[in-house]
Image: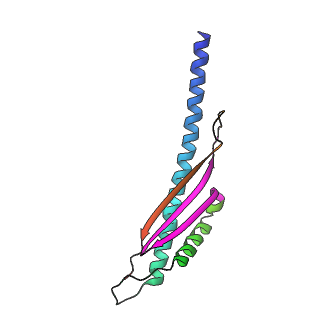
Amino acid sequence: MTVLIIGFAAIVLLMIVVVTDISKVFLVRRDLDATADGAVLAAANGLAAIYAQGGSGENAEIDPDEARRLTAEYLDSVDASNRFDGLGWRADVTGTTVTVQLSSAVDLPFQPPGWQGSADIASDATAVVPIR
């Protein structure tokens, strides 16, 4: 009976460790997704304001450097580098579409033997800049 109780206790503890680690990764990933959404919207809205033009009916060429600048300003304004460990980001422009990709590492609360102590996560968001 003692062996059975010890075995069940070990399984319960392992389940608690796994659920806690997965929950932490999920919550940080959700925050990273929200930050990526905010960054791409800030870049798209800023570019729409800069490139707003009347008349031609053609899509304007968007400056990728301006998209990167607007993304960097947003990430600085929300203090993303302090909220996420090892934050990496990229902003790309294709036509009138802006894509922001964020990546980070998450330190796991528990590190069972043989497991990594951190997990790498990434998020990306895309927005179309509606300028004519």
Q: Nearer the viewer, residue 118 or 6?
A: 118
**Residue 9's x, y, as percent?**
59, 21
**Identity of the residue furthest to the top in this view:** 1
Identify the residue at image location x=46%, y=81%. 49
Quadrant of residue 86 in the image? bottom right
- Tag count: 0
**Residue 52's x, y, as percent?**
42, 84
**Rendered-image quadrant of the N terminus:** top right
Magenta span dominant secondary structure = strand
**Rendered-image quadrant of the C terminus:** bottom left
Inspect the magenta stretch and tell me whether residue 87 lies in it.
Answer: yes
Inspect the magenta stretch and tell me whether residue 94 lies in it.
Answer: yes
Identify the residue at image location x=54%, y=56%. 32
**Residue 122's x, y, as percent?**
54, 55
Quadrant of residue 117 in the image? top right
Identify the residue at image location x=33%, y=86%. 57
Residue 19 vertical placement versus 101 (above, below): above
How is colour applied across the structure in the image?
rainbow
Identify the residue at image location x=58%, y=38%. 20
Quadrant of residue 8 in the image? top right
Q: Nearer the viewer, residue 66 or 31?
A: 66
Residue 98 vertical placement versus 108 (above, below): below
Task: Specify the segment rendered in magenta.
Answer: 82-110
Residue 55 vertical placement versus 100 (above, below): below
**Residue 18's x, y, as percent?**
57, 35
Left or right side of 51 for 1: right
Residue 65 vertical placement versus 123 (above, below): below
